[in-house]
């Protein structure tokens, strides 16, 4: 039952995201002189810049964001044509030191290059040893790991099967060997999750233990980019196993929601934004800006929506800016076009502990375990005093294939 519910939630989220992405198709890559990110070769390095745009590097080229054609790297990072390629890159997270915070560090051989706002900082390149004592040369990959996710503000440097955990405060290194992980050619932190990229595949890992939970590797072409015949076009497979129990509602950028826990969080797609409600926090990501977190977020539920409690489900209907939030046995409506936000209506429901809810042109479906209740509109849901006959959820109904 648990597994079924997880699969269901994944399917719901997938269906929602596919719907959303249909409006965000980009032109096909047709310049044969440029490398194609769908060729399965993978990347030398991946990092966001200070704006949150994710850059993928290979040789002298880069890709800006999760779709679109390759460009010469020196167009965005001018001095990079002297280097030719990079071994590794990461974006520094160091709010204590504003001079370093959000800088992009590139590594090549025994040199490090620091960029801010796409300009090489004065004094760079430097020897890696000068800036990162104890970190080896000829790295494979690097990724930042802020305090809270790692013990302290750190950077993970990968070389072969070793990971050198560099504490940016004490400037000390601890080396671990994660022989269960593939050798990462690049690494990325995305929405607080950590991904090791190797060839066309990627593996999600825990930044402290290195533990891999879930079914990996996965093909990056189905998740982090848009590739013909990979994971889109409204025809895809959703596979969830019982070992895959993600604790948050997480979607990977290009395409597909990777997992969702019915108790962990809710995703909403509204205009050009994705709202993620998790615990008492609301995160809003801007789709048009490569799903970057809008400045000032996360905010608390109270601040953003004027409500408190554990959100079981949330939905918006097409062409409407009222969000409906289900907490325990109540449903609240919040008008997102009004400032400050306030609950415009609060009604009891004839059930509680629901897993998810979805609104479409056909009405509202409220999911609980392997069953769902159907209502004509949010209004009929809010007015109902007796639960209607529960219906059986079918996978076909979610547009998912087993
Ligand atoms: C980037 O490099 C290419 C070839 O390596 C060169 O032709 C071009 O002028 C460079 N562009 C910039 C902006 O430096
Ligand atoms: C990618 O992963 C698949 C299994 O999911 C495996 O068969 C394939 O060999 C892997 N490819 C690379 C280049 O690691
Ligand atoms: C949006 O939904 C709310 C509540 O369901 C409803 O009262 C309102 O009329 C709707 N607005 C529009 C523009 O359809
Ligand atoms: C739902 O499935 C159960 C068995 O799994 C079955 O007994 C029941 O009749 C089904 N209900 C509907 C409405 O199809």
Image (cartoon, helix red, strand yellow):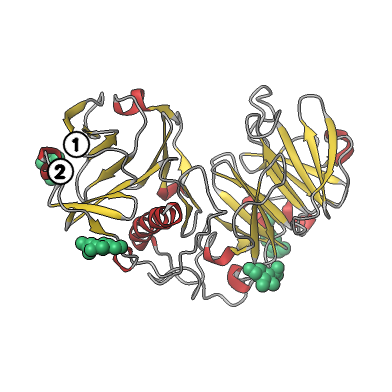
Of the two numbered discs 1 and 2 on the same chain, state the one appearing first in sequence. 1
Say whether residue 395 is left or right of residue 402: left
Residue 381 — which label? Answer: 2
Q: Position of residue 160 (x, y in %)?
A: 83, 55
Rendered position, 66 above or below 323: below
- Helix, strand or loop at label 1? It is loop
Q: Residues within 10 Å of mark 1 (few under 14, many from 20)?
A: some
Is any atom of residue 8 visible in this view?
yes
The residue that appears at 43% across and 58% down in the rendered structure is 7
User: Foreground residue, 380 or 197?
Assistant: 380
Indicate yes or no: mark 2 CB to ligand 3 under 8 Å: no
Helix or strand or loop: what does disc 2 sit on? helix
Q: Quadrant of the N terminus?
A: bottom left
- Residue 124 seen from this side: no
Query: Is residue 319 left or right of 304 when viewed as pictured?
Result: left
Q: Which quadrant of the structure image shows residue 15?
A: bottom left
Query: Which residue is drawn at the image coordinates 67% and 22% (left, top)?
Result: 96
> Residue 185 at x, y = what percent?
74, 58
Pointer 2: residues within 10 angstroms few (<14), some, or many (20+)? many
Vertical position of residue 300 compared to residue 129: above or below: above
- Decide: is 180 above or below 172: below
Residue pictured at 32% horizontal, 39% vertical = 353
Q: Is residue 269 above or below residue 255?
A: above
Q: Which residue is mark 1?
A: 349
Q: Is residue 299 left or right of residue 197?
A: left
């Amino acid at each position: 039952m648990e597994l079924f519910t997880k699969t269901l939630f994944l399917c719901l989220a997938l269906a929602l995201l596919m719907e959303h992405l249909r409006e965000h198709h980009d032109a096909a890559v047709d310049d044969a002189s440029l490398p194609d990110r769908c060729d399965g070769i993978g990347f030398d390095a991946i990092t966001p810049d200070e704006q949150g745009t994710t850059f993928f590097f290979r040789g002298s080229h880069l890709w800006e964001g999760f779709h679109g054609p390759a460009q010469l790297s020196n167009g965005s990072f001018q001095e990079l044509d002297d280097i030719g390629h990079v071994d590794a890159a990461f974006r520094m997270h160091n709010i204590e030191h504003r001079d370093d915070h959000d800088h992009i560090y590139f590594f090549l051989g025994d040199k490090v290059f620091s960029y801010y706002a796409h300009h090489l900082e004065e004094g760079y390149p430097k020897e890696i040893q000068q800036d990162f004592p104890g970190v080896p040369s000829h790295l494979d990959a690097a990724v930042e790991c802020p305090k809270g996710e790692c013990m302290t503000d750190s950077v993970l440097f990968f070389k072969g099967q070793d990971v050198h955990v560099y504490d940016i405060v004490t400037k000390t290194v601890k080396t671990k060997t994660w022989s269960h992980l593939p050798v990462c050619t690049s690494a990325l932190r995305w929405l607080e999750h950590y991904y090791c990229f190797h060839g066309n595949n990627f593996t999600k890992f825990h930044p402290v233990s290195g533990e891999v939970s879930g079914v990996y590797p996965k093909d990056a072409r189905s998740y982090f980019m848009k590739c013909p015949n990979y994971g889109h076009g409204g025809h895809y497979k959703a596979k969830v196993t019982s070992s895959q129990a993600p604790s948050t509602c997480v979607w990977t950028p290009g395409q597909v929601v990777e997992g969702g826990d019915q108790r962990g969080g809710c995703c909403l797609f509204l205009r050009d934004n994705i709202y993620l409600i998790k615990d008492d926090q609301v995160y809003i990501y801007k789709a048009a800006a490569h799903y970057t977190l809008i400045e000032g977020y996360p905010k608390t539920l109270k601040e953003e929506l004027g409500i408190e409690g554990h959100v079981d489900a949330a939905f918006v209907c097409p062409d409407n800016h009222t969000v409906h939030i289900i907490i325990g046995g109540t449903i609240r409506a919040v008008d997102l076009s009004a400032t400050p936000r306030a609950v415009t209506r609060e009604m009891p429901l004839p059930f509680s502990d629901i897993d998810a809810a979805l609104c479409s042109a056909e009405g509202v479906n409220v999911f609980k375990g392997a069953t769902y209740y159907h209502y004509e509109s949010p209004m009929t849901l809010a007015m109902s005093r007796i639960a209607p006959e529960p219906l059986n959820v079918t996978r076909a109904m979610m547009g998912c294939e087993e």
